[in-house]
């Protein structure tokens, strides 16, 4: 990202955390960023466009950090713990971003930002669900959605204490504690003493627009769109090779890994790269 654009984003988030999005003017952002108002509009058409890119910037940054851990071979539960720790590090490093979200919960966003937030939330749930299936196997499928949301709420509780109440914890110990509590949650479901309320049918109602319920179908759909609509030859070749591998009877992990590295060079496909990693790497 252009350094001047990044400076505007980082400056604005501090102002939004302090004053709120609606109460902060473009002139105030420009002054705090040491640029002219005209220079602001060279990078962003509106303040809403700035907010959208702000969300995307921090979301992609977190996904990249998580994907770095995903590239390292380790047992599923250990990988989950390390990715949780990385997520907490990113949240702690960008406290103003969380405070801004808390402040703005009651303010209606435009459709573009609302769709982005829905996409971020859905990918967050998928993060937990994919780890649950990797750790506990296909037998966890009936409980995976509800367990994902339950574990996600544990993560949020710890982060609220750290961000809003300024409590200090060992991030590794918190990550390990969440993973251990997840064991207890899954034992409760598997014992038959608790039936999941959040089922496939519930999730189908909250999936973001243009997303497929089946993750494999969603990945294939997005790769096919890239192949059909993009002009970048390297990107089209990457999508084509991934489609061939994912549709084959014996996908080759090494080939998929190499193509995902290529895909990650394009910021707009970080989410897709994360989905593929969760499934195949």
Image (tube, helix red, strand yellow):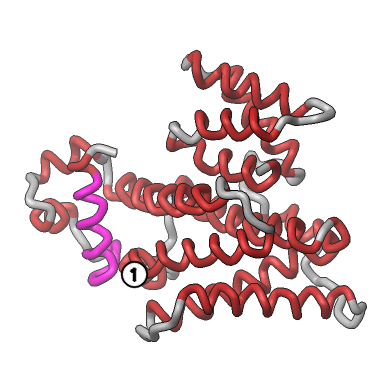
Q: Which residue is drawn at the image coordinates 62% and 48% (left, top)?
A: 208
Residue 43 lies in what quarter of the image? Answer: top left
Q: Nearer the viewer, residue 12 or 48?
A: 12
The C terminus sits in image quarter: top right
Does 67 appear above or below 232? Answer: below
The residue positioned 20% from the left and 49% from the top of the image is 7
Q: Which residue is mark 1?
A: 95
Residue at disc 1, secondary structure: helix
Picture layout, residue 152 above or below residue 219: below
Residue 133 lies left or right of residue 117; in this view the side is right
Task: Give the x, y percent position of residue 13.
Answer: 27, 60
Q: Tell me the crowding category of disc 1: few under 14, some 14 to 19, or many 20 or more residues within 10 angstroms, Cα based.
A: some
Relative placement, left or right, of 249 versus 119 is right
Segment colored magenta? 6-22
- Residue depicted at 72% across the width and 26% down the height: 245
**Nearest to the observer: residue 35 or residue 270:** 270
Left or right, 24 with reference to 27? right
Q: Position of residue 25 (x, y in %)?
A: 18, 57
**Residue at horizontal 41%, vertical 50%?**
61
């Amino acid at each position: 990202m252009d350094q001047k654009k990044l400076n505007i984003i980082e400056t604005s988030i501090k102002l939004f955390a302090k004053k709120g999005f609606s109460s902060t003017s473009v002139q105030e952002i420009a002054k705090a960023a040491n640029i002219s108002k005209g220079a602001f509009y060279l990078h962003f058409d509106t303040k809403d466009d700035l907010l959208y890119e702000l969300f995307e910037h921090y979301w992609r940054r977190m996904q990249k950090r998580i994907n770095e851990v995903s590239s390292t071979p380790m047992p599923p539960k250990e990988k989950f713990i390390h990715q949780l720790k990385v997520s907490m590090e990113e949240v702690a490093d960008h406290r103003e971003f969380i405070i801004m979200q808390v402040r703005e919960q009651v303010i209606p966003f435009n459709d573009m930002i609302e769709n982005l937030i829905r996409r971020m939330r859905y990918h967050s749930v998928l993060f937990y669900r994919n780890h649950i299936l990797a750790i506990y196997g296909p037998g966890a499928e009936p409980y995976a959605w509800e367990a994902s949301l339950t574990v996600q709420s544990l993560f949020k509780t710890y982060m609220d204490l750290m961000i809003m109440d300024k409590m200090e914890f060992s991030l590794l110990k918190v990550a390990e504690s969440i993973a251990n509590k997840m064991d207890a949650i899954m034992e409760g479901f598997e014992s038959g003493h608790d039936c999941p309320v959040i089922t496939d049918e519930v999730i189908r109602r909250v999936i973001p627009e243009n997303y497929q319920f089946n993750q494999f179908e969603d990945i294939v759909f997005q790769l096919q769109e890239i192949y059909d609509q993009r002009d970048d030859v390297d990107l089209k070749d990457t999508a084509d090779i991934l489609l061939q591998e994912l549709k084959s009877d014996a996908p080759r992990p090494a080939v998929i890994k190499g193509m995902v590295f290529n895909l990650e060079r394009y910021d707009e496909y970080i989410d897709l790269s994360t989905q593929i990693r969760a499934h195949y790497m």
